[in-house]
């Protein structure tokens, strides 16, 4: 049942990705509606999957890498959906939905290693901390997609290449402010995830901070994004530079997310991603 | 379809010829009246723009009609227009009208004025009672098709003049232009035009910096803006969002050295520089500065050419759409040819039956038929025609489109010797009369259904 649901939502995510990519690449097809409704349907099915899984598991279903990826695909779609409803920029969807598809398909391919879950993690802190962390990461991932779009458009404008997709891209200013809003939103969530995580760690490990790899990388990312926001605020850093920093920040995050898992380091591993 | 078009356009005639057939105002009305009175021509519309003069009209023999109009045009110009005139009839004429309305035949494909001009021409013809129901139907379809082509293809998208390219670039950088400021360096005509378009797109603040203060003030006044000297250029670059430069200066006015402090002053907000001057006013090296986008005349020209190319590709798609629409229209037109024939056939049959029943009852009057028997005779008459006409009716109704339907309608007309037009008019009149008799008070009232006999 759970697998069927997950596979259904995967198919819907793929449909959505094709819809959004079609919108970007073949202007006359008007496939962005397929993208939108495909994604909406995928979200509903995926949400049901996660709820169903939580009930059977008795806790937030992020107990291994597979579930982590699936949960990330979900939060990413939630953030993008929220953004699409507010700003109506289906072009960004062509950059986000493929990321969602990669995450969800990897989650299907990665073996579900059902390790024993320490009783200590069955805490009310888990869903709070996890949701903050994942939503924050997702917002920063969407920000990275927007930043990438910005860099593409910017380089085309500098090199004066106006053909092809150029006409369908939104304006530089709107992409820049979209990026800024997403980064601020993601930053707030990331901060809350760090605070809740730290408090919980204090309870669990009897030490708030101990240079544990996941904690450290989160802190590094936090400082990077803080720097980005402050420099924009004070020195007016924006546009290309802001986009590059957003993108680098995201790559560092992905690196720590995947790298730490592969190296199997730290106390976060074995329990959840 | 007995529509035809005779005319000339920028594609077939040079301006020296076109201007001799350019009618406007009263001239146009007189000319329209002349055309309308040419032998064999029923309904006519005359389209006159600076790129074309065309007569669209209906004639029982469209080929002959087209020649009549061509001869009239020849006389008008007292010259031989033959190499310049084109004549299209039937389907081709429809394709031509739809393409012209959709701006697919324009000098600048997709330019938006032509549809308005066709509408105007049609309205003028209608005012002078030169049009009838049939040409009205044709033109109103032409307007619909033009709208469809505009909406469903990209013929009208992408700027094809430098001043609109400037607006497009500004929108690509800033999105919304409300609240943005534009600086005109030099008071050239091109930058004035571009500034006008930018102001139309939402830019609120216009600053003019010019060597001659008088000219700067004059131009600034036009946009409700402010005039400055060229010396404050450095400071202004920190304030505005868009710069249009078109001075006659022999060397670069805006250089990276001048712009670097301005970039800081503007806190890296994007700056769009458009250089319309030759020799250039803006050092191309400024394009390397962050959030500064600089374009010169060649860049703009390249955009115009690319956009023109895109438009002509889109025009091919538009033409395909036009051909599909023409086919649909012709099919509908043929269906319209079938319906009156059916009405006439049924009307004639019913009348014949009624007359024969009357005659028979009259002859049988001596026999003293009961009322029920009389009713039976009447019913028999109606039943015979009903049965007899059942097959042809179904056939005519089920074949509303295509050549087949039209041929069938023609056959029925000939076989039964129907005067379709006259009968339909009589039927319509009778209907109108019945409606009138019911009285104005009852119009629109719900008529209750009869509850049994």
Image (cartoon, coloured by chain):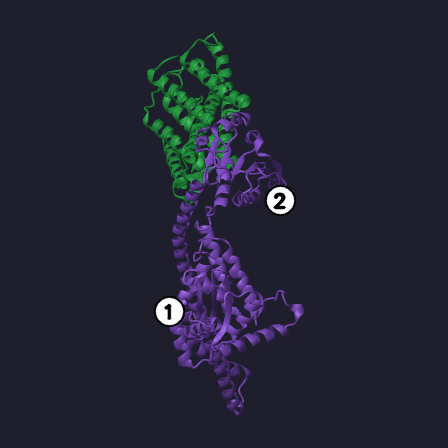
Q: Is residue A28 visible?
A: no
B23 vs A27, nearest the viewer: B23
**Residue at x 53% of width, y 61% of height:** B119
Q: Which residue lies under the disc numbered 2?
A: B222
A63 vs A83, nearest the viewer: A83
Task: For chain A, give the colour.
Answer: green
- Along the polypeptide, which appears first: circle 1 or circle 2? 2
The quadrant of the rendering that contains the N terminus of chain B is bottom left
Please determine whether, in this image, residue B209 is positioned above or below residue A250: below
Q: Are marks 1 and 2 on the same chain?
A: yes
Q: Which residue lies under the disc numbered 1?
A: B403
The quadrant of the rendering that contains the C terminus of chain B is bottom right
Chain letter for purple, please. B
Subunit of label 2:
B
Please determine whether, in this image, residue B164 is positioned above or below residue B425: above
Subunit of label 1:
B
**Residue at x 50% of width, y 74% of height:** B42
């Amino acid at each position: 049942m759970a697998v069927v649901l997950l596979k259904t939502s995967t198919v819907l995510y793929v449909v959505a990705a094709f819809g959004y990519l079609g919108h970007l690449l073949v202007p006359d097809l008007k496939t962005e509606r397929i993208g939108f409704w495909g994604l909406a349907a995928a979200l509903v099915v995926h949400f049901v999957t996660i709820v169903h899984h939580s009930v059977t598991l008795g806790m937030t279903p992020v107990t291994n890498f597979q579930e982590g990826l699936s949960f990330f695909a979900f939060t990413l779609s939630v953030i993008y959906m929220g953004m699409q409803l507010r700003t109506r920029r289906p072009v960004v969807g062509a950059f986000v939905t493929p990321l969602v598809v990669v995450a969800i398909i990897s989650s299907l391919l990665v073996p579900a290693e059902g390790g024993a879950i320490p009783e200590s993690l069955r805490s009310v802190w888990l869903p709070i901390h996890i949701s903050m962390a994942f939503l924050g990461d997702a917002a920063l991932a969407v920000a990275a997609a927007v930043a990438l779009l910005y860099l593409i458009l910017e380089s085309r404008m500098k090199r004066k290449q106006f053909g092809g997709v150029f006409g369908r891209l939104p304006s530089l200013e709107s992409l820049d402010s979209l990026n800024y809003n997403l980064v601020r939103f993601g930053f707030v969530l990331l901060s809350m995830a760090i605070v809740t995580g730290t408090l919980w760690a204090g309870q669990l490990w009897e030490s708030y901070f101990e240079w544990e790899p996941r904690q450290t990388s989160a802190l590094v990312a936090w400082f990077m994004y803080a720097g980005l926001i402050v420099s924009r605020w004070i020195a007016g850093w924006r546009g290309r530079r802001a986009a590059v920093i957003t993108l680098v920040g995201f790559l560092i995050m992905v690196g720590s997310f995947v790298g730490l898992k592969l190296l199997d380091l730290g106390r976060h591993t074995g329990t959840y991603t | 379809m007995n529509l035809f078009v005779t005319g000339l356009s920028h594609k077939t005639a040079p301006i020296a010829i076109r201007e001799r057939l350019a009618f406007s105002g009263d001239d146009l009305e007189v000319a329209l009246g002349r055309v309308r009175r040419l032998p064999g021509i029923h309904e006519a519309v005359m389209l006159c723009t600076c790129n074309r003069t065309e007569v669209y009209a209906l004639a029982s023999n469209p080929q002959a009609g087209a020649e009549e109009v061509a001869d009239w045009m020849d006389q008008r110009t007292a010259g031989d227009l033959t190499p310049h005139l084109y004549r299209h009839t039937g389907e081709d004429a429809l394709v031509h009208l739809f393409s012209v309305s959709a701006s697919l035949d324009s000098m600048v494909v997709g330019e938006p004025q032509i549809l308005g001009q066709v509408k105007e021409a049609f309205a003028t013809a209608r005012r002078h009672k030169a049009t009838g129901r049939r040409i009205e139907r044709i033109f109103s379809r032409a307007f619909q098709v033009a709208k469809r082509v505009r909406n469903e293809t990209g013929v009208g998208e992408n700027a094809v003049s430098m001043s609109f390219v400037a607006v497009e670039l500004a929108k690509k950088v800033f999105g919304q232009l409300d609240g943005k400021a534009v600086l005109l360096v030099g008071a050239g005509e091109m930058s004035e035009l571009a500034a006008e378009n930018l102001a139309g797109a939402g830019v609120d603040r216009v600053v003019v910096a010019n060597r001659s203060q008088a000219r700067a003030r004059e131009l600034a006044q036009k946009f409700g803006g402010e005039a400055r000297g060229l010396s404050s250029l450095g400071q202004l670059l920190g304030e505005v969002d868009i710069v249009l430069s078109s001075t006659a200066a022999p060397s670069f006015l805006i250089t990276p050295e001048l712009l670097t402090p301005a970039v800081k002053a503007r806190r890296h907000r994007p700056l769009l520089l458009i250089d319309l001057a030759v020799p250039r006013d803006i050092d191309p090296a400024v394009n390397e500065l962050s959030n500064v986008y600089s374009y010169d005349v060649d860049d703009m020209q390249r955009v115009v050419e690319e956009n023109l190319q895109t438009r002509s590709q889109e025009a091919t798609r538009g033409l395909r759409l036009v051909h599909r629409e023409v086919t649909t229209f012709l099919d509908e037109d043929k269906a319209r040819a079938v319906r009156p024939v059916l009405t006439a056939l049924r009307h004639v049959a019913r009348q014949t039956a009624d007359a024969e029943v009357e005659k028979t009852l009259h002859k049988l009057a001596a026999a003293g038929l009961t009322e029920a028997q009389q009713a039976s005779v009447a019913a028999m008459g109606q039943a015979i025609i009903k049965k007899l006409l059942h097959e042809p009716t179904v056939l005519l109704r089920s074949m509303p489109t295509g050549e087949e339907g039209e041929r069938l309608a023609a056959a029925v007309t000939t076989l039964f010797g129907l005067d379709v037009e006259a009968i339909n008019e009589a039927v319509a009149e009778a209907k109108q009369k019945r409606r009138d008799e019911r009285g104005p008070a009852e119009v629109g009232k719900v008529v209750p259904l009869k509850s049994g006999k």
